[in-house]
Amino acid sequence: MISATAPISPASLRPTETVWARWPWLRRAVSVGLILHLLALVIAPLAVAPTSPLWQRSWLAFRPYLEGLNLNHGYHFFAPEPGPSHLVRYELRFEDGHLEQGLFPNVQQQPRLRYHRHFMLSEFLNSLAIDDSRREVFDAVTRSYADHLRHEHHAAEVTLSLRRHYVPGPQHVTSGKRLNDVSLFAERPLGTHGLERR
Amino acid sequence: MLVRLRWLLELATTFVRDAVAATSNAWNNFWFKPADPTTLCLIRVLAGLMLFYTHAVWTLDLEAFFGEQSWLSREVIAQANRDGYSWSVLSWCRSSTALWTMHIVALTTFALLTVGLWTRAAAVLAFVFTVSYAQRTPGALYGLDQVNGLLSLYLMIGPCGSRFSVDAWRVRRVARQVARLSESSQIGQAARLGESSYVTANLAIRLIQCHLCVIYFFAGLSKLQGLSWWTGFAFWGGIANQEYQTLDLTWLADWPLVINALTHLTVAFELSYCVLIWNRWTRPLVLLVAVGLHLGIVFALGMPTFGLAMLIANASFISPSLIRTLIDGPARRSAGGPPAFGQQTPAALSPAAPNFPRRRKRDAEFHTPG
């Protein structure tokens, strides 16, 4: 198994024999572009907190490119810690006074990708909740989720809570604790949202 | 003294000149050497399928995620992206009809990319739609969308429709007709088309490979900040997370050393990928571990799409000759000898590539009457 770019021509085929060599400036321009592109790819994860002022300023320079091409990613999968997961519990109050409760994500949702989209919504809310510098956005997102739920269920009012689900240690599991043990859950109230329009 | 100084200066100049020339040659060989587009074309088919599926799933909740009363309203996205440069063609859709029309166009685009019809235009549009969906609902994204984004970006660059595609079949059919009229004009056109296409195939594949190295490296580096990745129990945090798990591996609680080993292996793999993948001897092992890791994500962590998308990106390291052997070999045998579907691109017919004996042989097969 060799490289996917193994040339179909023999090694003796020099770049001067390619169409690119007829316009050397094109190859140079593309080379500069490639260097900048690779630099941008590296700067995006380097600028994720905790980071240095150097990477922050570099990121600002590349920001239009990174965001414009949707390349602004940190690639911090399950890092720095896998951590607990988060769900959103909601309670709907209808005009006639009756109440209904719900939770998302709902593991019954199929296909799995659909479930995961909803799971990411609740994780996104948590990522904002723990970031004091984005308090304004957190409030706006909470309000948006509430408005969506109210509209979806034709409810008058919705009360949201962010539910944290801790992961038990291996020693707890071996001693008989279940993954959904009630002691593994904690909730943070997110307020009640009424009929006020966005 | 002066002679010695001059000798030293000349030595230094020669060294620098040789180093620059060697680096320049290595750079050009790495990025600009013409390459077989077979791997890129296979990635197009697989990535096209993944893009189609990923976006088809949005159909179930289209208005809930992208409509006027969506989870993340347009106003919230605008607020979060106040000083940013994100964009989305979906923000043009102010009515349900417009949204559904756009969605159908997007799904059609992904289908066209998969089958390779009007591939170049489909690849550009596929990228536009991939970015648009992602940036319209940033709160619902995860690794899958990042990999989809990079694949759709680089597929725009190379001749990803030159094989395994309706376009290739059409070109072959036209070439056959032209060959009957004028062999020379066909040859000239073929040479021009083929030559530049191969360089861009290399560029696209190299970009996927380098991007993948960046992803793995920073995935590994970021884990070094976490205590559980050092104490060896981070792997447990994944398999015992009920919101992720689709396969119960909590019996591993009785095997803490196995959990430690899998945790450390994950970090070691991610950190070393960008080095070991380039060596021909270690590459098969690295790819084998990548397959194991991502199949684990597929079956145990409930992210089949993300796991498969990463494997599709890893396919960029598979040799085109291996893919040709695996796909074309059986196809040719079953067809009794003629070239496989999409095999005969204009470049393959070109005598401008005199050192391509296999291609010339196929060329001869191609010109065989009847």
Image: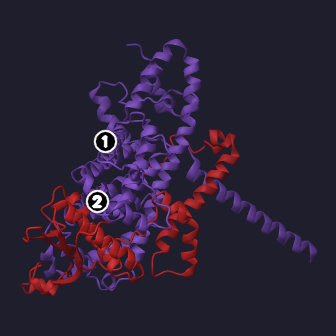
Image quadrant where one finds the N terminus of chain B: bottom right
Mark 2: give few (<14), some (14-19) or many (20+) Cα within 10 Å. many
Q: Amino acid at mark 2?
A: Ser
Q: Disc 2 to disc 1, how far (Cα)?
A: 19 Å
Q: Secondary structure at mark 2?
A: loop
Question: Which residue is tagged 2?
Answer: B70
Q: Is residue B339 above or below residue B91?
A: above
Q: Is residue B265 visible?
A: yes
Near-viewer residue (A52 or A90) = A90
Q: Amino acid at mark 1?
A: Ile
Q: Which mark is residue B90?
A: none
Q: Indicate the position of residue A187 as horizontal and vertical percent values.
A: 19, 83
Residue visible at 21% across and 65% down in the picture: A149
Question: Which residue is tagged 1?
Answer: B104
Q: Is residue A1 visible?
A: no
Near-viewer residue (B211 or A126) = A126
Residue visible at 33% across and 25% down in the picture: B337
Near-viewer residue (A169 or B51) = B51
Residue visible at 17% across and 74% down in the picture: A89
* Colour given to chain A in the rendered image: red
| Residue A19 quadrant | top right
Tell whether B190 sits left or right of B285.
Answer: right
Q: Chain of mark 2?
A: B
Image quadrant where one finds the C terminus of chain B: top left
* Colour given to chain B in the rendered image: purple
